[in-house]
Structures are given as C-alpha cells and as structure tokens.
Amino acid sequence: MGRLAAVLFLTLWQHGATSDPCSMRTDDVPCLHVKSCNNSASDFGPFFVSNANGTVPAAQVTRGEICWDQQGIHVSEMAFDRSIFSPYTQCNSPVFVKSDVLEVFIAPVLSPLDNPQSYFELDASPSGVMWAGLSNNSLGNSSTCVSADGCAHSGTLPCTGAARFPHGLTVTVTNATSEGWTTSLFVPWSLFSDPFQPVPTDMGFKPWSTWRANFYRYDYPNGQQGDYELTAWSPTHNPGFHRPERFGVLVLDPA
C-alpha cells in the first residue's frame, strides 16, 4: 500500500466510512466485536485443539472476556484445570516450557486482511509470572510497526518482579485449584505506536478499531508428567502458534 493510499485508508477507517471489518473476511477465522468495559465485556471461547486439522474440542475448557477503556485493553481468561503447575517465579522466564500457560498474541492492523509481521506475545503462567515480547514474524504480510518503542529489535520486553513491564503492561493471576485458574491481563494503549492511539471525539474518545489477535493455551490434561495439549480461540491447524494468517479479528466498537 502506497503512503497516500495508506493515509486515505486510515482516515476513512477511523471515521467509519468502511463496512464492518468482519464482513471483509472470507475464511473461518473468528471475528469479535469488543465492547467498552462500561458496556460489559465481550465473550470469546471455548478453545479448540490448535494443531488439529478440524474443529476438535479441548480436553479442558478455556473461555475469556475482553473489553477496552480509557487506559487500554482488558483480557480475562478462565482455564478449567485438574492439575495446575508452574515452577517459575521471575518475569520473562520460559513459562511456555513445562508449565501451564495462557498466551495472547495481539497487534493493531490497517485492514482485517492484514496478517501482522509485528505483534506482541504475552504469556501468563498460573504462578503469576509473565513472559512478554515483540515478535517480528516473516510469515506476516504487513510490516507496520506496532510498538511505541520501535520494532527494529524484536525480543523480550524489559521487566521486574513477576509481571511488571513497560507502559504498565501487567497480569494478575488467581489460582482456584479445585476448578482451574484465571488471568486478568492489562494491555495499555501506550504500548502501541502513535498511529494506533485512541482519537478524541465529542463523546470522549474512540479506540483504534481493527486488530488481529489470538488466544492460546498450553495445557497438561493428565498432569505435568503427561503430554501437553495446544489449544486456541482460532486454531492454527499447525504445531506452531506463530501463524498470523490464523489470528482472529477484533473490532473495538465505540463506547
């Protein structure tokens, strides 16, 4: 997309001159309208086995809610789990290795047809530890930079403690060992580059409307000595999670 065309697209998109982004998709990736937190959250899930060819139910259910407010995007997930475990205590530990984990991949996009090359991966473990990083994925078809801190160097974000990251990015975890565990992830607007910041309106402000995202889980249905199961909101039909063409679409509706 040329610079002039991109500017025109951005202007029309932000001012609602295009159709519902969900109608632009012709494949089976899910598309979810996300409400303001003042109007209640939008539900997503259950997850399905991600590396299966078809739609295969997960051994243990995962569901979530998502909404936005003046500070950013809020994602809450509930992972039903008979055997919860994670050995990690420090942020940016490899929580995706021999640990239960809930993962969120997310990026704003210019079009719902864009498969982002640049996106954030945010992985939370039941011990309250989060791994967070910026991915630069050659499988994407859109190289738009999404990070407020630039996209020249991908990799882990700096952090302290269990889950304290730049711009206020964080997660809190509640363990309920008889049923499962829950996460509350806060993704601040300030994590993203200037073009994707909310814009003022007569009613307050309007968030950037179109995002690509996926929600994943590493689960051990038979306990930590058993094999893991990969599940997702939008299954990748591949052993890997980093498949941007399979990310779902999030449409952030005005308040």
Image: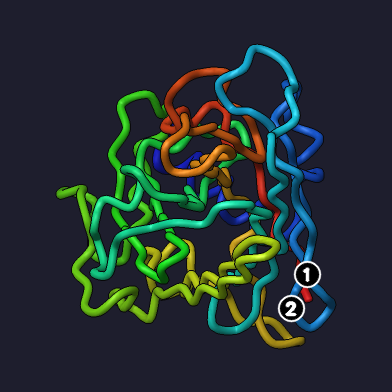
At 40% from the left and 42% from the top, the residue drawn is 3
At 64% from the left and 67% from the top, the residue drawn is 76
Answer whether residue 107 is visible to the viewer in this image.
Answer: no
Element at label 1? loop
**Label 1, label 2: how many angstroms apart (C-alpha)?**
6 Å
Q: Tell me the quadrant of the picture where the N terminus can be found.
A: top left
Q: What amino acid is labelled 1 in the image?
A: Ala
Q: What amino acid is labelled 2 in the image?
A: Cys
- Left or right: residue 126 compared with residue 31: left
Residue 60's place in the image compared with 72, above or below, is above
- Tell me the number on the disc at residue 7: none
Which residue is under mark 1?
Answer: 41
Answer whether residue 4 is visible to the viewer in this image.
Answer: yes
At 41% from the left and 34% from the top, the residue drawn is 142
Residue 51 is situated, as x and y percent measured from the top left of the image, at: 55, 21
Residue 229 is situated, as x and y percent measured from the top left of the image, at: 54, 32
Residue 65 is situated, as x and y percent measured from the top left of the image, at: 72, 63
- Left or right: residue 166 compared with residue 225: left
At 53% from the left and 26% from the top, the residue drawn is 245
Which residue sits furthest top? 53
Q: How many numbered circles are shown?
A: 2
Residue 73 is situated, as x and y percent measured from the top left of the image, at: 58, 70
Element at label 2? helix
Which residue is under mark 2?
Answer: 37
